Amino acid sequence: MKFSDSVTAIKGVGESRAEGFRSLGVSTVGELLRFYPRTYEDWSRVTGFANCVTGENACVRATVLYPVNNERVRGGMLIARTAVSDGESVAQVVFFNNKYIPSMLKSGEEYLFYGKVTLGRMGEREMISPLFIKPSQSVEIRPIYHQNKKINSRAVQSAVSFALENVGEIKDYLPDSIIKRYSLISLDEAIRAIHFPKNSEQLQQARDRLVFDELFILQLSLLTLKSENAAAATNNIVTDDCSARFAASLPFELTGAQKRAVSEAVADMKSGRQMNRLLQGDVGSGKTAVAASLVYTAAKNKMQSAVMAPTELLAVQHYDTFSKLFENSGIRCALLTGSTKASDKKRIKEQLKNGEIDFVAGTHALIQDDVKFRRLGLVITDEQHRFGVKQRTGLCRKGDNPHVYVMSATPIPRTLALILFGDLSVSVLDELPPGRQKTKTYAIGSAQRGAMFDFIRRSLDSGYQAYIVCPLVEDSESAGGLQSAQEYYKKASAAFSGYRLGLLHGKMTAAQKDEIMAKFKAGEIQLLVATVVIEVGVDVPNAVVMAVENAERFGLSQLHQLRGRVGRGSVQSACILVSDAKGEEAAARMRIMCSTADGFKIADEDLKLRGPGDFFGTRQHGLPRLRIADFITDTNMIMKTQKLAAEIIKSDRRFEKEENRKIGVQVYRKIRSLQVVNTANTI
Ligand code: ADP
Ligand code: MG
């Protein structure tokens, strides 16, 4: 039997089962062997009823006390019932709609029962529909597979068993050197044991080997793609590096990390190949100055640049910041958003087409069909994961292989950055501008809100500004005690009479939001009550207090972003998290926020608490699907294999060495299957 044989070559697999297999994604014998169990029944740890934890699976050896009573109840349901004893305690066992139970369970005989032990109505122990076997059958750990109407887990199991008996030895593609170095078991042993482990130790070894393989091949594939992508040629070439001149015009000295990031990107832009680079920097690390430096350099090399932001508010802010940085530089700037006046839009589009504008900041409005550039050489997107792929590629098509620079303010755990952005180069701003004071973070209950108001008043009295963030815009029936910005604004207006308050939320029009934000920036508003619309990127250095109501409603990364809105000047700032939530997860989040300011560490914790789907806030988080490895729990393995993959790419990028040839075959196969997913990561 060969790996490429259809599953119908397996005894017992006819057309119907083959169809069932197909909808599980399995058509060949090879795919079947890689169809790993979803979980396992552990029959190896036999215990007594007295030791069972209610609601958890357990395996108990027990004797049937009397013949099974099979009874049809009203409604037609068939209920089979008996009692079993483990020698010390008794439990009821109950089955529904199975007329064969009386012939399968014999009174006076001993069986192993596997299932959840629960408490019945009278407090008696019960096992509902447990699995059972004769103790003589020496099964210790049993595989449980995904199943469907056409094929159940048992049938999958027997098909796998048949296949394993008939495929012969499964050949390894890892060289002995790697197997030894990482103390792995052979592929043959691993695949056999992942389906039918003899004990939990062997299962662990099998899993280790297969997780290693999956992550190793994945990372090799991504690195290979990256080295191939780097070859895209472009005519957008920087010949004159003007970044030092720009740096000299800044009111501050760039940090070492900023300088490094600029020179990495400029080197890309000089290379004659398209830049594909991600800038990762914690909030306040100064990504804007880096981006501006590149825009300046592009403009001085006769290329136009576009910055696309996810919200109107941020587009406007980018426009303002960049324009200010470009004062007296001769760089012509424009802003193009949905709410730009029609007549202005027309003029700006004309000027972009004629090359009379060097730099445009904007929102999605930039990707409309009638926006054309004379020579778009640099595309910068801010807060990358908020954009769909289509929008980014849309902007790139307006140029001829423009350089792409992606700025992400959400620190992504280091282990995942390479997998998510495996085909991008990454620059990291791991240093904050000097003179910053660490923001102090406090977690309080709502009973202390009065004291918090006093604290905020004192800050306002000293000439500073503050934010209070609420989870909702307006009160609604489903709110369940959550604070809404609108109601809160009313209450706060009374509590802060004599102060200048503002309200900002997502249901306001862009013009209204801009007006409020402008007033806050100008200091006309002292206290801003807002929703998370202010979360990303807003920069008002005079704001020194960030209070968050119902803090339990926000994810860690979001809280970190909010906290990043303060502490942007040289003054000691404070972040106050208000929450009455009792849950363990909420408590864990507050603890982490109070104990660290490191965005990468927070991202790690956030990922652990919420999982990748929620962490990235969207289902299309771009992480490839894994068969067996887990992005959260297998971080050690991710790092190990990352290192090894990098070593191999460095020494034998085309897998030409004898020992790497078979690895190469796996890698190219993987790349083919990744291409679909990978467009999500490629710009
Ligand atoms: P972020 O990375 O969050 O986008 P910004 O680019 O908004 O950060 O920068 C945060 C603040 O730090 C801004 O007010 C900016 O002017 C200031 N800043 C940036 N770089 C430096 C530096 N090297 N020295 C001092 N201040 C800086
Ligand atoms: Mg920013």
Image (cartoon, rainbow, N blue to C red):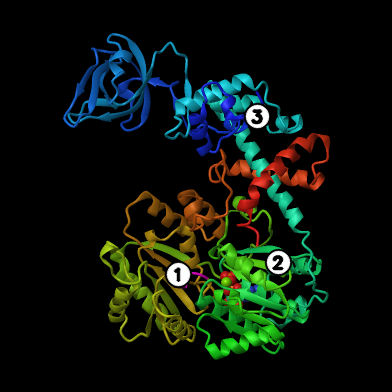
In this view, the residue farthest toward the top is 108
Nearest to the observer: residue 547 or residue 98: 98
| Pointer 1 residue Cβ closer than 8 Å to ligand 1 | no
Helix, strand or loop under label 1: strand
**How many other residues sit within 10 Å of disc 2, few (<14), some (14-19) or many (≥20)?**
many
* Residue type at tag 3: Phe
Nearest to the observer: residue 421 or residue 388: 388
Sequence-wise first label, 1 or 3:
3
Determine whether 210 is above or below 51 in the image. Answer: below
What residue is shown with label 2? Answer: 261
Instruction: In the rendered structure, find residue 483 and report the number of the disc placed on it.
Output: none
Q: State which mark lies toward you, 2 or 1.
A: 2
At 50% from the left edge and 80% from the top edge, which residue is drawn? 542
Sequence-wise first label, 2 or 1:
2
Q: CA distance from mark 2 to mark 1?
A: 30 Å
Q: State which mark lies toward you, 2 or 3.
A: 3
* Residue type at tag 1: Ala
What residue is shown with label 3? Answer: 3
Q: Quadrant of residue 136?
A: top left
Instruction: In the rendered structure, find residue 574 and report the number of the disc placed on it.
Output: 1
Q: Give the mark count.
A: 3
Name the quadrant of the N terminus. Answer: top right
Q: Quadrant of residue 318?
A: bottom right
Q: Is residue 534 magenta?
A: yes
Q: CA distance from mark 1 to mark 3?
A: 62 Å
Image coordinates of residue 156 in percent, x first then y, are 50, 27
* Residue type at tag 2: Ala
- Left or right, residue 655 beside residue 221: right
